[in-house]
Image (spheres, coloured by chain):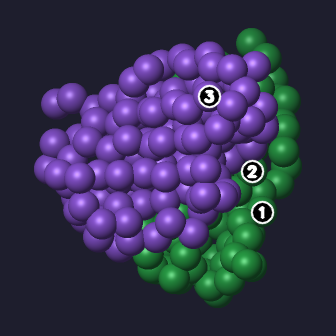
Chain colours: A green, B purple
Amino acid sequence: GQQVMQIPQYQHVQEGEDFTTYCNSSTTLSNIQWYKQRPGGHPVFLIQLVKSGEVKKQKRLTFQFGEAKKNSSLHITATQTTDVGTYFCAGPKSNTGKLIFGQGTTLQVKP
Amino acid sequence: GAGVSQTPSNKVTEKGKYVELRCDPISGHTALYWYRQSLGQGPEFLIYFQGTGAADDSGLPNDRFFAVRPEGSVSTLKIQRTERGDSAVYLCASSPGTGASEQYFGPGTRLTVT
């Protein structure tokens, strides 16, 4: 079945360093969504990418959707302690509402 | 406005008991989703509703799990004959439209089966 994989599973960085997480789908996606889950919290929607090769920015966060619409990345520039949490990518199954989540990348930021 | 709410926030039950978990979606959202999340894992899809009907229940692990949304708003996830392996956080989400649109998650219900 459709799978979504993320690497790395964990990342520890010093505050101010950059961070990147990568997401790969076994199938072509109609879109890719990114969510952030703070420790003890619930997933919160960050962004949705739809077009092949699309790049979107939210302040220090840059999201990319691959040309083949099977992979995506999230890059954070100059991390801050408020960036701590687990970042999930998720892709819909066959353009339905059923989202397949990756296992997430947990970011720890040392002040 | 109010977000997605879930009750109870925590539920401890004995193996073999029956439990019901409730989800109140954002008002006006037609799609409602149930997920299960184990420690260190991403949310695992269980079922989703479009209005009152279950559009996709392929993620329900077995026939002990059942969910309803009789009036197209509140939904209840029901688990019969609970097992220790059912212990997890059960997340509910809603979205405004059909198809693949962003989902708004509730705080979850932490279910512990002893």
The picture quadrant where one finds residue B85 is top right
Graded by Cα atoms within 10 Å as few (under 14), some (14 to 19) or many (20 or more), the crowding at tag 2 reads many
> Do tag 3 and tag 2 residues touch (Cβ < 8 Å)?
no
Quarter that holds the C terminus of chain A: top right
| Relative side of A7 to A91, left or right | right
| Relative side of B99 to B89, left or right | left
Q: Position of residue A101 (x, y in %)?
A: 64, 57
Instruction: Note whether B57 is above or below A94 in the view shown.
Output: above
Q: Position of residue A51 (x, y in %)?
A: 46, 79
Residue at image position (61%, 50%) is B64
Report helix, strand or loop for mark 3: loop
Q: Mark 1 or mark 2, which is nearer the start of the sequence?
A: 1
Residue at image position (35%, 37%) is B23
Q: Find the residue positioned furthest to the top.
A: A111
> Do tag 2 and tag 1 residues touch (Cβ < 8 Å)?
yes
Residue type at mark 1: give it.
Met
Looking at the rendered structure, whether the residues under marks 3 and 2 are on a common chain is answered as no
Can you identify the residue that label 2 sits on? A103
Can you identify the residue that label 3 sits on? B17
| Relative side of A4 to B110, left or right | right
Residue at image position (73%, 78%) is A1
Residue type at mark 2: give it.
Gln
Residue A63 in sight here: no
